[in-house]
Amino acid sequence: MIAADHGLNFVEYTLTASNISVEAKFHLTRTKDCDCDSVLGKKHKANPEVLNWDKERSKLERKRFSENRIALLITQKQKVYEDRIAQETISDAEETKTWLSFLNDSRLKTSLPEIGIMYHQFSGMITNEKVNVLSEVSLPVSKLDSDFLKELKEDEAVWIKL
């Protein structure tokens, strides 16, 4: 299967969406369970935690830590935060590469004229959720890049012309 060759999990599933132009029958995901940290639609998700270092300093001052101790703790927290952001950036780049290599796979072009991609945050089991597709757009595969994946809007079906 083409999806598995790119590290994507494939599940056959009929998407229940009364307002979509075609019946969607498949679900692709990076993992077997949840893709909450996915690059898909990342620009529209809740902003990542941005730490207020002045606020962190005030908390530590209220605990009556010395200036040296406060400086050390703030430096440690900043390092952990920066490491997490760096790891997230690497993870996003790897996932982007996976999706783009899958969507540009020549085997897809020989078997399908187009493929749809949609970002949806499920609130429960995938088999029980009714999805309301808000809009549909068409895009040639040549226009795909990392920004495309990050800018996917929730419940917008994007039909990619292969």
Image: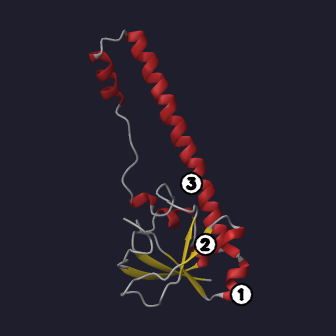
Disc 2 marks which amino acid? Answer: Phe
Q: How many angstroms separate mark 3 from mark 2 (CA)?
A: 20 Å
Nearest the viewer among 130 and 145 is 130
Q: How many angstroms separate mark 2 from mark 1 (CA)?
A: 19 Å
The structure residue drawn at horizontal position 45% and vertical position 69%, both measured from the top left corner, is: 119
The structure residue drawn at horizontal position 30% and vertical position 23%, both measured from the top left corner, is: 59
Q: Circle 2: is it few (<14), some (14-19), or many (20+) Cα within 10 Å?
A: some
> Residue 10 bears which disc, if any?
2
Picture coordinates of residue 12 (x, y %)?
56, 79
> Residue 110 bears which disc, if any?
1
The structure residue drawn at horizontal position 67% and vertical position 68%, both measured from the top left corner, is: 101
Chain-order first, disc 3 or disc 1? 3
Q: Dot 2: what SS?
A: strand
Mark 3 and mark 1 residues within 8 Å of each other at the beta carbon: no
Disc 1 marks which amino acid? Answer: Thr
Q: Dot 3: what SS?
A: helix
Q: Of discs 2 and 1, which sits in the foreground?
A: 2
Q: Circle 3: is it few (<14), some (14-19), or many (20+) Cα within 10 Å?
A: some
